[in-house]
Amino acid sequence: MSSATKVLDPAFQGAGQKAGIEIWRIENFQPVPLPKSEYGKFYMGDSYIILQTTQGKGGTYFHDIHFWIGKDTSQDEAGTAAIKTIELDASLGGRAVQYREIQGHESDKFLSYFKPCIIPLEGGVASGFKKPEEEEFETRLYVCKGKRIVRMKQVPFARSSLNHDDVFILDSQNKIYQFNGANSNIQERAKALEVIQYLKEKYHEGKCDVAIVDDGKLDTESDSGEFWVLFGGFAPIGKKVVSDDDIIPETTPAQLFSIADGEVKPVEGELSKSLLENSKCYLLDCGAEVFVWVGRVTQVEERKAACLAAEDFLTNRKRPKSTRITRVIQGYEPHSFKSNFDSWPSGSSNTGAEDGRGKVAALLKQQGMGVKGMTKSAPVNEEIPPLLEGGGKLEVWQINGSAKTPLPKEDIGKFYSGDCYIVLYTYHSSERKEDYFLCCWFGKDSIEEDQRMASRLANTMFTSLKGRPVQFLAGSHI
């Protein structure tokens, strides 16, 4: 009997065999499949396991596993979610990257699975969870943050929760109100409208009214007057109060620790891949994020112990709740892990990406532009390809959801590490009227969904140009 079969929980039978999302909630310390109708709804008193399966070329499946910890969940349930996550990974071949997601501090990658947002709700299984049809409607107030990836947080239904800097959504039985703080961001206001449409369809069967209330504009005969009546009448609101959710952990120089028998001990010497032994587990502390690296030949029980040791490590060092824990397996380390090492064999890096990065940088330099907003991990050869020396037209699009948005000329060259771009250079050659140089640029902090969308849209452009680009480079990570 294989080790994967031994640890396979019946709830995970058949998991990861098709592209998409699968979710389990921890109930009585066991994973229970969640109905698809409940996806995106997370109760604060519960813990969940989320499996994202994608299909690569040749039909191979790739997996990312997240476990979400509600702020009111018990420590035992959270521990069960962490352990069951490792068992799920083992049943899938032990190659998945695993992410701990704390309520209010979820990664952009995790939030990107749920459009337009996730909705954390009060209660949970332990507090007598009821089916949606059994629940009485409760008026709820949310603060809505995020210009691209939306973060929703339920706050007390009280005037004191409002401020001038954020966007709020008040979901009442007959009407949904959007309150725009006077200093709130216009992009966050637009995202809040998407959330309101989602709430309207999911919880009101598409039949309730929607109202926009602007901070400082009071009209007692309008939606504004109705909004303030719900809060007991109009009165001045206070300034924004900084909470634990607003604290961003500091990134510190990476430090490596070995994990053995539950003990975490520092490893001396410069960070090098050669320090990592395939029969051991290690912890890489980067301040804002902690990685647990597990050797290829370690056993499932060792992996479970290593993840629990990482939890204790953060607790003992009094790290903020928002500190992330990511577990990676030897041979499947993401760039965010490998980039912390001074020495990592060049054979494991994406040489095509380095080549693409240099050519994009050179192309922008040729156009009189520098590449701003990016950090280079190593010098690259910014050499202009011979065919591109004659001058031409440069166009850049930023990936925004399922679409690409053209960058204004004055913004070309400002590439941000959290975004993905498509670059098209049109020029004249001696043989043809027009030729093209087409590539994708992936920021090192960009999410996989945006990377896949950039590649897909660039492929569409390649086809529309009848296959004439002289070079197509996908995956130029910076």
Image: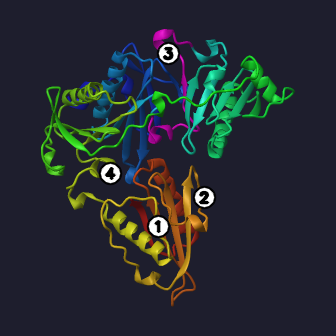
Residue 56 appears anywhere in the view: yes
Q: Dot 2 lies on which element?
A: strand
In percent of width and height, residue 346 lies at 23, 61
Q: Amino acid at mark 1?
A: Cys
Instruction: Using the image, tell me which numbered label, if any, was put on residue 335.
Output: 4
Q: Are marks 3 and 2 in contact (CB under 8 Å)?
A: no
Most extreme residue toward the top is 128
Looking at the rendered structure, the secondary structure element under dot 1 is strand
What residue lies at 79% left-to-right and 23% top-to-bottom?
Answer: 226
* Amino acid beneath label 4: His
**Which residue in the protein does label 1 denote?**
439
Q: Does 470 appear above or below 263?
A: below
Return the mark for residue 124.
Answer: 3
CA–CA distance in space, label 2 to label 1: 16 Å
Of residues 196 and 469, which is closer to you in this image? Answer: 196
- Pinpoint residue 292: horizontal percent, then vertical percent: 26, 37
Q: Which residues are magenta?
A: 106-130
- Residue lying furthest right in this view? 221
Mark 3 → mark 4, Cα distance in angstroms: 36 Å
